[in-house]
Amino acid sequence: ALKIADYIADKGSILLYEVDKNNNEKVEKSENNPIIEMPVIILTNENTASSSEILAGALKDLGKAKIVGTKTYGKGVIQQLLTLPNGSGVKITSEEYLTPNKTKINKIGIEPDEKVELPEESKNKLVIEEKEDTQLQKAIEMSR
């Protein structure tokens, strides 16, 4: 997500905060000048999670993309799997992601700039015809 955002964000822009339980922050910044300098529209829904939310949140906060669709899933934590001496494991949450504006993602999600629901008959399809995809149609309209 950060590598993709680095293609679009201005050099030195904050892309992400990683915050631990003691409120220690690690800041991730864009390292390069943007190579994509055109309007960007990101489609989201309730299955958009984790890295996808990091990308959407960063570009939205930086004014580099518009979000179209429905609210994202809301997975904004870093989890680690630790192996115990007896071979079992434990998963711990070590940090939380925040967008450049320090907006929490976890259990909240990212609200789109333009809320557009898919028609009920299209929601569970793996492939949606372009003319039936209301989110895509809105993104195309916005890009003109």
Image (cartoon, helix red, strand yellow):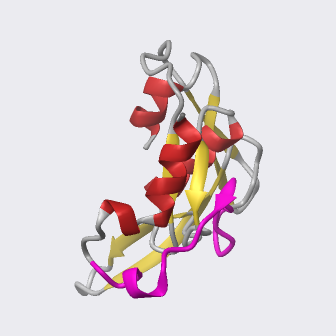
Residue at the image position 55 percent from the left and 73 percent from the top: 73
> Magenta region: which residues?
105-125
Above or below, 53 against 64 in this view is: below
Q: Is residue 13 visible?
A: yes
Q: Main secondary structure of the magenta part?
A: loop
Residue 131's quadrant in the figure?
Answer: bottom left
Residue 82's quadrant in the figure?
Answer: bottom left
- Which quadrant: the C terminus? top right
- Asked if residue 117 is among those painted magenta in the image, a careful observer would answer yes
- Which quadrant: the N terminus? top left
> In the current view of this chain or complex, which residue is farthest to the top?
33
Above or below, 141 against 143 in this view is: below
Q: Position of residue 5 (x, y in %)?
A: 48, 34
Residue at the image position 41 percent from the left and 35 percent from the top: 4
Marks counted in the figure total 0
Above or below, 131 against 3 in this view is: below
Asked if residue 32 lies left or right of residue 61, the reply is: left
Q: Is residue 55 visible?
A: no
Asked if residue 89 lies left or right of residue 2, the reply is: left
Residue 25's quadrant in the figure?
Answer: top right
Q: Position of residue 87 (x, y in %)?
A: 22, 84
Q: Position of residue 49 (x, y in %)?
A: 48, 65
